[in-house]
Amino acid sequence: MGLDKLLVISAALFCCGLYAILTRRNAVAVLMGVELVLNAANINFVAFSHYVSRVIGGQIFAVFVIVLAAAEAAVALAIFLRMYATTGTVEVDAADQLKG
Amino acid sequence: MTGPANLIFYALAALTVGSAVLVAVLPNIVYAAVALLFSFAGVAGLYVFLSADFLAATQVLVYVGGILILILFAVFLSNRISDVKISNPARFQWQAALLCLALFGVLSTTAVRTVFPLKHGLTYQPTTAEIGELLMTRYLLPFEAASVLLLAALIGAALLSRPDGKGKGSADMEEPK
């Protein structure tokens, strides 16, 4: 194990998340992709904090990222449930009421 | 690090990346959510290898215990069980796969070829006390901002997920028509 291997793992997670965001139609699945991307960023923070930096700031930043991810997931899922009650579906293509 | 630790590291890496791939490609969203669980658990294991014990515990508590349950709730509340089409077809698959593979190639080549200024003498020590001290001193402002943000998210989520109809007075989710 080493820094480069962790960076490759993180890159793989990021690309899987990006693929899910790009291809999925269900909004909840898109949110799963976002969570994967955030986890990839967190792995990078912690890996650099462990292998390169002398201070622990990377881990603190990762804690804040987790906090933001939790808040974002709660609000996003509330929006999805609202959207389901309104339109009867959570497909991202259905949320086009503002389309002219 | 050699021997069994190396083996465990590679097993965790394979678990994390393999489950992430499954999250991206599995058509059934419930299966994708379960794969996401394993991916999060694998990331928590990787944190242990990076001497981030507090973060590993936080990952398990918040992601596996919180966010994943929320996602599963959203999946079950936003799909009709009787509906056969619980999964929906993906789109732009080839273009997205090409883009992601190219991006992965660029990122991993860059990561492998770059020479980072690695520090000598890696230490494995408990980090909880240090994180707590830093949160109360140097990172106090972001800490307080995060608490306000969490409160706002809490109120916003509670407001958003309430059913309409002001006079009904029912706090349950309405059955969609």
Image (cartoon, coloured by chain):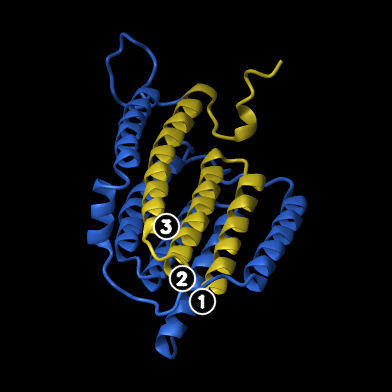
Chain coloured yellow in this rendering: A
Q: Earlier in the sequence, mark 3 or mark 2?
A: 2
Relative side of B106 to A42, left or right = right
Residue sticking out furthest to the bottom: B3
Q: Earlier in the sequence, mark 2 or mark 1?
A: 1
Discs 2 and 1 lie in a common subunit? yes
The answer to whether the residue labelled 2 contacts the one labelled 1, judged by CB atoms less than 8 Å apart, is: yes
Q: How many marks?
A: 3
Relative side of B19 to B151, left or right = right
Can you tell which of label 1 and label 3 is closer to the viewer? 3
- State the image quarter where residue A9 is shown: bottom right
Relative height, residue A26 to residue B2 (above, below) = above
Relative height, residue A80 to residue A18 (above, below) = above
Residue topped by disc 1: A2
Q: Secondary structure at mark 1?
A: loop
Residue nearest the viewer, comparing B126 with B62: B126
Horizontal and vertical percent for residue A24?
62, 45
Instruction: Classify the position of the N terminus of chain B by image quarter.
Output: bottom left
Q: Residue at x 62, y 41 (%)?
A: A25
Whole-Å distance between the Cαs marked 3 and 2? 11 Å
Residue topped by disc 2: A51
Relative height, residue A57 to residue B110 (above, below) = above
Residue topped by disc 3: A58
Chain that bears disc 2: A
Chain that bears disc 1: A
Chain that bears disc 3: A
Q: Secondary structure at mark 3?
A: helix
Whole-Å distance between the Cαs marked 2 and 1? 8 Å
Can you tell which of label 2 and label 1 is closer to the viewer? 2
Q: Residues within 10 Å of mark 1 (few under 14, many from 20)?
A: few
Q: Please name the color used to draw chain B.
A: blue
| Amino acid at dot 1 | Gly
